[in-house]
Image: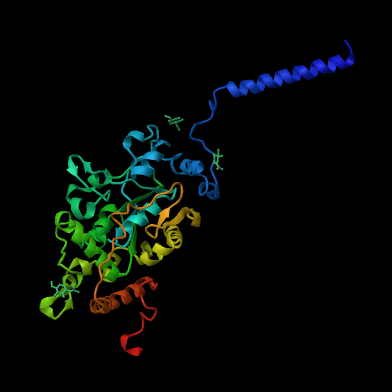
Amino acid sequence: MTMRHGYMIAFLSVLTVSYALWKYELDRPKLVHKPQDKVRTYTHNEIAKNRTMYIQAKFGNSCYKTQVYDTWWQTFTLPPGLKRSNQSDCQKRLPNVIIIGVKKCASDALRDFLIVHPSIVYSHAPKTYNGIKVTGSGEAHFLDRHYDHGIDFYRNLFPYSKPGDTLLEKTPQYLNFPDDVPKRIYEDVGPHTKIIAIVCDPVTRAISDYVFEKKHRFYKYLVPNMIYTIRSNFSDSVTENSRQGNIDAGNDLINVGIYAYHLVRWTEYFPLSQIHLVDGGVFRNDPLSELRRLETFLGLPVFFRNEHFFRNPDTNMFCVAFPEHRCLSKEKKGQHHPDVDVKTIDRLREFYRPYDRQLVEMFDRIFSWMDTDILLPRGRH
Ligand SMILES: *[C@@H]1O[C@H](CO)[C@@H](O)[C@H](O)[C@H]1NC(C)=O
Ligand SMILES: *[C@@H]1O[C@H](CO)[C@@H](O)[C@H](O)[C@H]1NC(C)=O
Ligand SMILES: *[C@@H]1O[C@H](CO)[C@@H](O)[C@H](O)[C@H]1NC(C)=O
């Protein structure tokens, strides 16, 4: 055997052994000695761009198995059947963030966008619980409709969550109805609960509410004690004929939009630093900027970016683009508004102006629908 042959054999042996080792690595069952939940922590940049990494970040260490993603994305639910059995710190908990309104100010869109954030835990409230009809909309309505069932009933409407999770609820009636919702949240849910309301032009809101309630008449069936007057046209509905056309502030079409009046009640229990207003007018045209403000308010890692949204050319409304495309259902949203006479609009603007000014003073922000001189007294210009 020559020296060259010797080298050749040695080389071939090394190759064979390497191949065998490599093959062994390939065939060996993977991750046998690694705990399965131990996943690499992805950077925010990766999570915000790559769907696989996003799903891992949102559900990989959650109370639910990762495959819950499809169900959650399509139905906004986290079914108990997909709960992980071995996560001992997963329990039913009360929410620590509540969106309290405002009806017809895109609170659905706000929720739909916000829950994409990997740190937020959200599941629609079940239609029934313990034989009791809870909701048709996914909104828990505990503090307005189901309060008498007790706090454990409320807790059970939520998905399982872990101690550090941001657990969200949204029921837009809470802003104004009933009066003691702030007290109930403070005492029963907790004094540290964070409160969010999306507000929008109260005049446009009143018209949207009119169109919506005239069509669906939800106020009649679903919300006892709410006071709506819906006549054959908008102007007639919001003015009191008997009082020379004064605005009917008792009609919820109008009353709901008196944001400052309602929010003052909330500040009796919660410091302003714990209440965050989303400007619905800004959100509609630039959802990212409002979501960034929310991330800051909620103390969440920065996640949202421009590529996560796109404007739907059919409705001119923003939709979610990441991790998948999702738009609000068209039939319910963006209804055509009736023409309302200028006189009624002017009257309503005058009516809301002092309350809008109060809102500016409370939250130190001029909202998109307001005149920039809102803080100046009326006579000065
Ligand atoms: C939890 O259960 C899953 C599957 O049932 C398992 O793969 C995983 O290793 C378990 N995690 C822990 C921390 O025990
Ligand atoms: C997303 O991340 C997964 C898991 O790390 C990776 O396998 C996949 O190639 C990535 N996709 C893209 C488009 O980068
Ligand atoms: C609204 O309806 C009332 C009668 O119900 C009518 O007198 C009034 O002109 C209508 N206003 C508008 C703007 O159509």
Residue lying farthest to the top in this orientation: 1
Q: Is residue 38 left or right of residue 189?
A: right
Quarter of the image holding residue 374? bottom left
The image shows residue 111, relative to residue 3, as above or below, that is: below
Q: Residue at 35% of width from left, 54% of height from top?
A: 111
**Which quadrant of the figure shows ligand 1?**
top left
The image shows residue 369, relative to residue 152, as above or below, that is: below
181 and 357: which one is in front? 357
Name the quarter where the C terminus is drawn. Answer: bottom left
Quarter of the image holding residue 182? bottom left
Residue lying farthest to the right in this orientation: 2
173 and 233: which one is in front? 233
The image shows residue 374, relative to residue 259, as above or below, that is: below
Q: Residue at 14% of width from left, 57% of height from top?
A: 220
144 and 240: which one is in front? 240
The image shows residue 127, relative to residue 219, as above or below, that is: above
- Whether residue 304 is visible to the viewer of this picture, yes or no, is yes
Q: Residue at 23% of width from left, 52% of height from top?
A: 141
- Measured from the top left, where is residue 270 in percent x and y? 32, 63
- Measured from the top left, where is residue 22 in percent x and y? 65, 23
